Image (cartoon, helix red, strand yellow):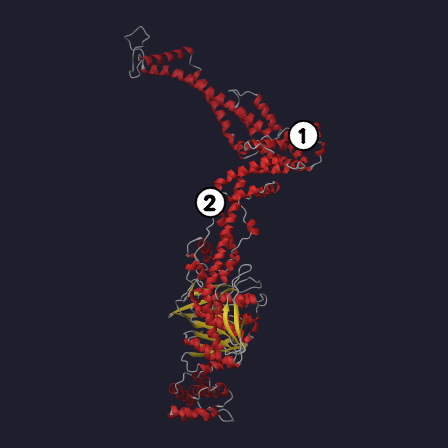
Amino acid sequence: MITGGDFVLKTLSQTQGIISNYISQFLMANHEVDTSNLVDKWFRSRIQIYFDNIQEVEKKSIDITSIDFKIPDILQKKTRLVSIQPNYFRGFRKHENPVNLQGDLIVLDGRNSSGKTSLAEAIEWLISGHICRRETGDPKELAECVANRFKPNDEETWVELLLDQDGQIQTIKRVLVKDYDTKKNSACETKLIINDKELTPETTPDILEQFFSGILPLLMQHTLRSFVLDSPEKRRDYFEQLLSLDRITSLIEKSVVSDSRLDDFPNKSGSTMLAEWIGLKNFTSDKNIFRRLERENAPQMRITFQEILTKIAADEFDQDTDLSLEKMVENIQMLQRSVRQQNFPLLEKLRPKRTLDEAMLEQLSVNNYGFLIQRLLQAQSEYKTAQLSAQTISNAQIAISKSLENLREMGLILDSIDDQTCPLCEYSDIPTLTKDRVNQISAWEPIQKAVSISRQNYERMSEEVLRIVEDLRTIRYNLLPKSFSDKEWFTVSDFLDDPNLIYLRTELDEADATLQMFDSNVILFLSTPIRVDDDENILYKDFQDIVSLLPTIVEHARIYSSRFSDFENYLGVVSSQDKNYTTRELWLNVVEKTEVLLLDLQWEIAKKKAQQELSLIRDTLISIRQKYLEARRFDFSVGISEIWNKLRADQYSVFDKLYIPDPRGRGFPVKIEVKALLDNNSETHEVDALGFFSESQINAIGIAAFVTRSKLMGHSCLIFDDPVQSMDEEHFKTFATNVLSHLCDDGFQVIVLTHSDMFAREISYAHSDRINYVTMKIENSRRKGCRVEEGNRRVAERLDRALSCADDGNLERAWYFIRLAIERLYTIVQIKHGPVGFNPSSWANHTTDSMWKESVGNIVKSLIPESAERLHDILKMTVGGTHDKAPEGNTNLINAVKDIRPLLSKLHVGG
């Protein structure tokens, strides 16, 4: 279910344009997910898109004027509370029976610390899985605050709630798995059971969303108190939550990647070429040419890049503009080498002639040579076999075999005839040439040819092996030059103590000493001809002795190349006294790694485009939020005014409206100002209400805002936890009479928890004839913990208590409740049928007799003359048990209850 700010996001996700994709991932994410991580993830994905396909950012996102923010009732199904049963939750221990919450107006009263807030938090925890007071309070003071401290080990902490959703009963139960600990960000772990089915975390629906549109219909004491005492910024946050703007506001605040954060999104290649590119730019006199790349698309970028490099070489290094880039590179490399060579004459002799690149590593892989020697040995074996086969064939036989082929070609000998006459014999009529003889003669020449072919193959393989060994020797010295004599090193005596040269020289000497065996094996192999009668095992071993040392060559070459690079870089620093040396070196490195740098530059351009896109989305979200705010502000402001006017009758300072100025500042936060109107009967002034209102007036705004929000969210149930704190007796009455009547008449189920007996009494006076008005009592005992029991305010409830006490044999207590029931009945009769403007509080200290004598007796006699005397007689019986007079018996009590109950209908009061 999408609500509030999520409704706006859902609406945007269904539009077309760049903003739709951006919004969708936030709707799919859990509310607890860090929004900044989602922004970073989205930003990386957009960089990749622009990197893969450089394109322009859309100049417009969506037409916000076309969006309709007129929200219908969000909750299509009306949800009411049926009952709640806490088990070892907070102040509750085992509560055997559910607390029946069926009714239009339910009042639960009890002294402070009796368990009212525990009951309210039981509803909050069951629906949301959290306790707000714990998660905003001191984590150490409120650690392990869910489970009751007297819970036995074999008991669980749980709360079960029955909801009526459009006539369908839903049972929701939340069981505590792990309580809060002392860490600030800790959460309690729970399992959720709906309609007797335990749900997994993956399938657990958001109960708050499903039944209450994402907003708890619960106004807690600490919520109202924090609104009064918090800073203006916190008050703004409170109103943002009331308007359901916290998610979209949070998204706006996080939807930014500043220039300083662009470095947090590096190219996945890990290249550092951008730093070299910036270094080259800093050393170049004409910096405007670098801007050209920022405007190019990928295909053109390479051409522009080469043009920039060519221009730098011409302007900075005096290169001829007619030269190709390749020729410029060659010239500048020679210039750099000459500078280094002047400082270190041995440099070029020490420089590896080959680079240990991927191709070279492949060439030096041992795996390449195993089959080579096998092929040589195979060729050797085939040649020997062919020689043995040919030893029995003479030259004369080869001549006869050739002649046979000539006769075949002339058609004088036919393969289709088995026995035929030899055309060379003088016995022309005798078939002396048989088929077997022809086949025998034909085989002599191919055997001789096989010898020739196998010999050629053997000689070719021998030459290939020798050539490869020669190549390996060449590679070895191209990668690792020969070690120098002390005399040669002395020519660079100024550098002999430099660590870079010491490392280089040490590695060269170690490599030379290690590879002497390789050199010796190669020399021996190349100087010894490969003969056909060589022992195969020896030939194989000699070749393996060479190949097995290739990994050693690679390892020394790798180390030596690194050492040489370090030393040459050091020489470059020494040589940088030439003012252009560093610039030329940067230029050469950029040219060498053009491909890598181009990718880095494309990535930077993609980052800028993604940044532009995010900025556009953010601006659009701000505009949309402002439109949504204005659409909601009027309804919200009118709703607050309506509740305020029912609650307050102030004249000098009154609530005027909510005002939302244009957002500004970091994150463009919404600032919701509460305006009041000051009136001295001659002029008026609009001012900031929070600066002029009393605490009671600010509480009234909080209540009015809560009620208005619930109306807009489509709630059908409201729960107030001591809503009249800081109010005086006058506003107890206006809340009870005006606000609660307005809510009940609007179809709300209203549950009020209060510690004020006076406020509870005012509610009973105002709603005495409301059929579905229920009162309950919350008490806390050392033995049983918090308990919710039937209240003592309704006549029928007091009569039930009287019968219960009578069953326990406590007649004195039973008659006490009969008297309280009659007192309640008299008060209700006076409210409904007495003089207009009667104040029930004026009878707070009246006795039942004085109530009867003052006016109730006459009202009862006029409405039910046949029962008036009986009611008065019952009242007289209630004094039993006082002044040493024994209480009346059980039969009289039961008859009294039977006689009083019908009077409620006859007197037209609801009790």
Residue at 30%, 6% (x, y): give it.
Answer: 427
Front: mark 1 or 2: 2
Relative to 515, is 448 on the left or the right?
left
The answer to whether residue 305 is above or below residue 232 is: above
Q: Is residue 592 visible?
A: no
Choose between 144 and 93: the one closer to the eye.
Answer: 144
Circle 1/circle 2 CB separation < 8 Å: no
- The residue indicated by pointer 1 is 345
Q: CA distance from mark 1 to mark 2?
A: 50 Å
Q: Where is mark 2, residue-wise?
A: 53
Q: Position of residue 699 (x, y in %)?
A: 53, 74
- Residue 169 placed where, x, y %? 39, 69
Residue 488, above or below 148: above
Chain-order first, disc 1 or disc 2: 2
User: Quadrant of the image for the C terminus?
Assistant: bottom left
Q: How many marks?
A: 2
Amino acid found under the numbered disc labelled 1:
Pro
- Mark 2 crowd level (few <14, some 14–19, many ≥20, 10 Å Cα): few
Q: Is residue 599 visible?
A: yes
Callout 2 secondary element:
loop
